[in-house]
Image (cartoon, coloured by chain):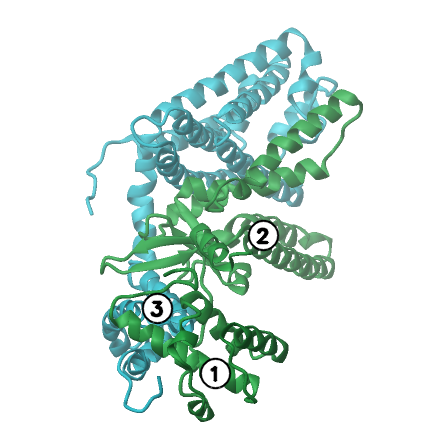
Chain colours: A cyan, B green
Amino acid sequence: MNAASAPIGPTTLREMRQEEWVRLEAILRQVERRSPRALSDEDLMALPTLYRSALSSLSVARETSLDLELVTYLEGLCARAYFFVYGVRTSPLRRLRLFFVQDWPNAVRSLWRETLIATLLTLLGLAAGYSLVASNPIWFEAFVPDGLAQGRDFSASTEYLRQTLYDGGRNNMLAIFATFLFTHNAQVSIMCFALGFAFGIPTAFLLLYNGGMMGAIFALFVSRGLGTDLGGWLIIHGSTEIFAIILAGAAGLKIGWSVVFPGEASRMNAATSAGKTAGIVMAGVVIMLLAAGALEGVGRQTITNSIARYAIGVFMLIFWLAFYYLPRRSHHG
Amino acid sequence: MVDHAAIHHALEARTNRSLVTPEGVDLTLRIADAGQRFGALLLDLIFMVVTLILVTIILGVAAIAGGPRFVAAPVIIWLIGFFLLRNCYFIIMEMGPRAATFGKRIVGLRVVARNGGRLTADAVIARNLMREIELYLPISFLIFNTSQGLADTAAWLFGVGWTFIFAFFPLFNRDRLRVGDLLAGTWVIRTPKKTLGLDLIGRNAATTRLTFTDAQLDAYGQFELQTLEQILRLDRPEALATVADTIRAKIGYWDNSSDVAFLNAYYEALRSRLERKLLFGRRRRDKFDR
């Protein structure tokens, strides 16, 4: 009970190992504050050994010491070191390149069933919107909110509608409107994806509504004989943007499907793997919407020839289809 | 009689999750509780709002100073900045080495993969995009309430109820998982920054004068010893007085030593005794454990 002779056990543990813990903590602090690249070579070489010796200190302390402070400290230190040592780091550039070349197309390709369903839903909405508005213009307000219509409804003159398709002026407001549209559409896509968790039903509704809105606008312009012009106006960026919204809906549907029908995995695991795939697809969707926004902002003002607009739109569509669905050699590892 | 040891063990069982490293050591991770996660979220939202206000002021000044011709650029920057802030702030911060936003860092939390593996980029993206339905949807429901009449109000209430299920999802499961965590296979753990305090044994030379019999040292187990340790480290006079009185009453040790000296001496003696027993493989968890 009294420390008449040199005590064996935990007090000596502190004395023996405390320098290593201090060094490990200094390395971790440097890594967390700045990038891992800030470590010197000796520190980097010493880190795994220090980590393992901290683990062994923790095991010894748990078995021989009743010092709560020591055990808690070592647990925290070992956890921090574990998350750094076992968090494998590839360089961000390589990670980015892998994303573009491999992760993104693979993720989209694995969603081909959901993509088809999303396309069908959009087309269904399109057909419904078109036929309803063509038969009775009263339906137009139901499908297209005022803010998006901006005066383009059945009370507008044909000349006004034609002007909206080919107007190259008012540069400032168009650029702002394009950016607003990009952020709005990106948010709608993310909402489509997130709502997929609710078994995919709100996602389906959103897709139908989106298609319906397009169908209604088409009905309006077709009734004034401006159908092909509207097609050109839309397709420059629309082929990319509508594809992106369909993919976002597909991602949401995948999550909803995997929660309801998990197959052989547990619901939790199925939802987790679906969520990760869908997350990659969503990152790609945002990139696509960025591209669509750029096309819209730049292309629509400068290119006023209808045929050129169709050409660009169709080219972009073929590009995306080839990027996603062309078979390519898969990189393993 | 309240069994504090049992309460303490129940609390530990609720918040501790085991993570066995490849070396075979079980790191007990402690799950962040709902209050801590909410606090971190509030801090992050405050940070985002403050940044937004600052950027708006700066861009507003730039727009006014630039004149009517250059009003487009600041507005575009603001729109894109708002979009990036809303979606990418969490994603980029959680992909860093500390896997924590500023709010989480202040509270002392961290995002970690549930299976103990790497926290991959797609997991971080997925868990943060789900925040759309957990946070922004309920908020927009609350703000944009344009109900006119009973049916609208009923629909609004239903919408609020449904979205709030997602918002309060962490309260409905043991691991305090958000919907985003569920989907991405992650959870949030505590990472308290600790510096190692001094060993309590050998701190006070005067304690060697006080001795205790075996019977007096048999009164308590590991839980009481560690509670005493925490009280000694906190070093608050009222707490020390209360505990000293309790222990003196229990073991019947009345002398005229000071509370601090008595408690330090008792702690040393008790710990040496219990650790010696530990070396022989006998661990006494608390005073009821025989």
User: Counting other residues with Cα less than 10 Å from the Cα at mark 1, is it few (<14), some (14-19), or many (20 or more)?
Assistant: many
**Mark sitting on residue A36:** 3
Direction from residue B99 to residue A152 in the image, left or right: right
- Distance, label 2 to label 3, CA atoms, is 30 Å
Q: In front: A216, or B106?
A: B106
Which image quadrant for residue B150? top right
Q: Which residue is mark 2?
A: B38
Note whether residue A287 is visible: no
Locate the N terminus of chain B and report the quarter of the image it occupies: bottom right
Disc 2 or disc 3, which is closer to the eye?
2
| Residue A292 horizontal/vertical position (percent) | 49, 37
Q: Tell me the chain of label 3.
A: A
Q: Which residue is mark 1?
A: B264
Direction from residue B208 to residue B25 in the image, left or right: left
User: Counting other residues with Cα less than 10 Å from the Cα at mark 2, is it few (<14), some (14-19), or many (20 or more)?
Assistant: some
Instruction: Give the amino acid at mark 1.
Output: Asn
Instruction: Give the amino acid at mark 3.
Output: Pro
- Residue depicted at x 62% and y 54%: B42
Q: Tell me the chain of label 2.
A: B
Q: Tell me the chain of label 1.
A: B
Vertical order, A129 against B14 (above or below): above
**Mark sitting on residue B110:** none
Which image quadrant for residue A22? bottom left
Vertical order, B65 against A260 (above or below): below
Direction from residue B228 to residue B23 in the image, left or right: left
Vertical order, B273 against B190 (above or below): below
- Residue depicted at x 42% and y 82%: B212
Instruction: Give the amino acid at mark 2.
Output: Phe
| Residue A74 horizontal/vertical position (percent) | 36, 70
Which image quadrant for residue A206? top right
Locate the C terminus of chain B and report the quarter of the image it occupies: bottom left
| Residue B204 horizontal/vertical position (percent) | 46, 90
